[in-house]
Structure formats: C-alpha cells, structure tokens
Amino acid sequence: MSIQNILQKREFDKADIIALLHAKTAEDKLTLQQVAHETLLRERGNKVFYRGLIEFSNMCACDCYYCGIRKSNSLVQRFLLSKDEIVETALWCAENDYGSIVLQSGERRDRAFIDFLCDVVKTIQRESISEKLPHGLGITLSVGEQSLADYQKLFDAGAHRYLLRIETTSPTLFASLHPPSQTLENRKACLQNLKKIGYRVGTGVMIGLPGQTIEDLANDIVFFRDEGIDMIGMGPYIVHKDTPLNIHRESIALQKKQIFELALKMIAVTRLVLPNINIAATTALQAIHPIGREKGLEHGANVVMPLCTPASVRKQYLLYDNKPCLEDKASECRDCLKARIHRIGHSVGTNQWGDARPFFSSPNS
Ligand code: 5AD
C-alpha cells in the first residue's frame, strides 16, 4: 500500500508504521508531516505546553554507555543544587506562567536523596499555589529507576507526572547500551509501578542508536500504544565524546541528516498512532538542527521543555555533545522559545498543566 493510502487510515498496524517510517520521497515525507500536523491541530489544538526543565543534579549511580554524566565519566564536575536554588527556579517558572516543571537529575537511590527530593517537591507544590495556579505547579519527575515505595513517597509529596524513557524496546539493543545491572525488564516494571500509583507516565526512546533498525522503532511505537503512555519524549541519539559509544562517532556523523529526519518521522507517526497524547519537541532535536524543535512541533509535537537550569551549572549537565542554550539565562530561553513558537503559527499554553487527560476535575488541568 502506498504512503498516501496508509495515511487515509485511522488505525495503524505494525506494517503500516514500518512503511510510514520508511517514507522516502519528498512528497511522501511532506504528506506524512502534514497529516500528523493536521491530526495534532484537530485533536489537541495549536497550543504548545511548557515544562520548565530544572536539571538539579548530575550525580549518577548508573553507567549507561551513551550518557555524558555516567558514573565512570570522571571528567564531570558533579553538583547538586540546594533546596533554595531549586525552589527559587521553580517559582520563577510559575511567575513566568509556565504552569508546569520537570525536575530532572542523574539516578540516585539513597535515602538522603529521596528525602531531599520529597521535601523539595512538597515545598514547590505548596509555595507555587496562586490565583492563576490553584493546584500549584504541575510537577514532573525524571530521576530514573526507583523502588515502588519511593515512587509512592514522591507521588504523595505532590509529583503527578514521571518521565522514564525506555530508551529502546529491543532487548539486544538495550543490553548493548547498558551494563548488565540495568535491565529492560526492570525499566518496564518501573513504568508499570508508576502507572499503578497514578502518575501520568511519560516514556520515549533515542533515535539513530548504533544497530537500531526501523523495525525496532516501529516496535517502540507499538509499545507506547500498548502501555497506555500519556507522554512521549524522543530525540536523536547524539554522541558524547567521553562515553564508550564514542567509537561510533564517525558513522553517526555521516548519518546525521538521516537521523534527524527519522526523529521527525517518529514524532509524526507517534502522533498518528496516538492522536491524543503529549509529545515533546526535545532539545536534542535542536542540538543537530538550528530549528529542530520547531520542526518537531510541525511534525505533531505539542510540548517543549524550556531550559531553566541556573546558568552556573548548565555546562555540567551534558548528556551529549553540542547541547544548545548553554550560555543563555532562563529568561533568554523564555523569550527565544516564544518567538520560535509564534513564528510557526502556534501559541503558548500558559499557566496550565497541559495533561492529555485532566488530572484534577477542575478547569486548571
Ligand atoms: N543522546 C541523546 N539523548 C541522550 N540521553 C542521554 N544521553 C543521550 C545522548 N547521548 C537521553 C536519554 C535519557 C534522557 C534523560 O536523555 O534518553 O533518558
């Protein structure tokens, strides 16, 4: 079946997904983009929701082979922002109408860390309540694999969303990216636990990983659908020079354009398969293309995560090389993103949590 015919459908099976991801001609790629964008506008409107991203610590107990802040990278200067710094940054987001934040860090499972984070979440939740945010800021956590009990504690403290990328659903590929102590099974169990507790759950994958096939990516989209995921954050894999996967640097560099296109096709096809969910136009897209995030929005994404991490530590949170916005202050990211979003005819959804399904039965969902 031709791409044009598949795009007439409302439901897509794995063979359709594979065919769409293979779209090659300029005409097929353009139609895929247009249909995905129309689906977004029909299902969710043109509002882009912000999640102010606060990267509050780069301390990490994991050793993922692709990640710049992996435990074994001794070149990284480690940091943990103070409670006051994190709360102040979060309240800046609230004052600037962001409505929702993401607290992200490397993975730590020690008691002191979980207690610290619970305290931070509670304080942000309480202090961000205002007339424009009657429930306070929406708080998303992205702090990796934790126990069910700790996920519950963090939920009870006031976090309501959690981002945990599956990275890839291919068992062999997952094993080639992580040490044996990290397993795909545990990652899946964590996602199940998060859902059981009541979090809105986000996941996602990296695109263009060494050895990854189109079929792997199609399986990833089927996984998003079967797991009832609420949000997707996906982006291109980008080499970090001080990681084991740096050995693939040259072949990845040669495929940069294809990987970027594939990342956009993944966004478009995910929008078609899951018309209603939130999909992020990630910063990694902009790391390999100057208007990467806008392209993401035009392919069906509806969330952006403006970088709000204090300027003093931005350069210490490098998951990959060429991360953009390192010299910018949070206010510059605010103004720059707004202009970028308006330029492509979308608007910003201010003071909203922007959930795909309302978390509270109130107007401020
Ligand atoms: N390139 C692209 N994305 C990366 N991440 C980590 N390292 C890289 C990299 N080198 C992504 C992972 C992780 C998220 C926080 O950042 O998908 O889940």
Image (cartoon, grey):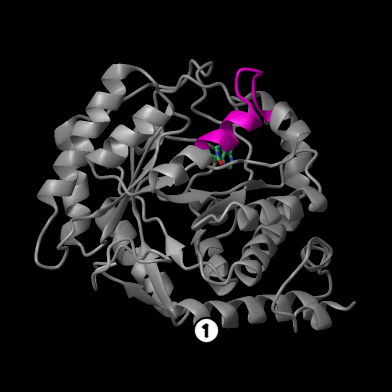
Q: Which residues are magenta?
A: 177-190
Quadrant in which the N terminus is drawn? bottom right
Judge left or right: residue 96 versus residue 334: left
Q: Nearer the viewer, residue 258 or 346?
A: 346
Which residue is painted at 53% across and 65% down in the image?
Answer: 291
Circle 1 Cα neighbour tier, 10 Å, few/some/many (<14 / 14–19 / ≥20): few
The answer to whether 170 is drawn above or below residue 59 in the figure is: below
Tell me the quarter of the picture where residue 107 sits. top left
The location of residue 137, given as percent across then percent down, is 22, 55
Judge left or right: residue 363 versus residue 296: left
The location of residue 87, given as percent across then percent down, is 17, 41
The answer to whether 266 is drawn above or below residue 250 in the figure is: below
Judge left or right: residue 146 versus residue 188: left
Q: Residue tagged by mark 1?
A: 42
The secondary element bearing badge 1 is classed as helix
The location of residue 120, given as percent across then percent down, is 20, 36
Judge left or right: residue 53 versus residue 66: left
Specify the amino acid type for callout 1. Arg
Disc tally is 1
Which residue is painted at 74% across and 70% down in the image?
Answer: 12
Which residue is painted at 65% across and 81% down in the image?
Answer: 34
Picture quarter with ligand 1: top right
* Disc 1 residue: CB within 8 Å of ligand 1: no
Q: Nearer the viewer, residue 208 or 120?
A: 120
Q: Nearer the viewer, residue 212 or 157?
A: 157
The answer to whether 117 is drawn above or below residue 258 in the figure is: above
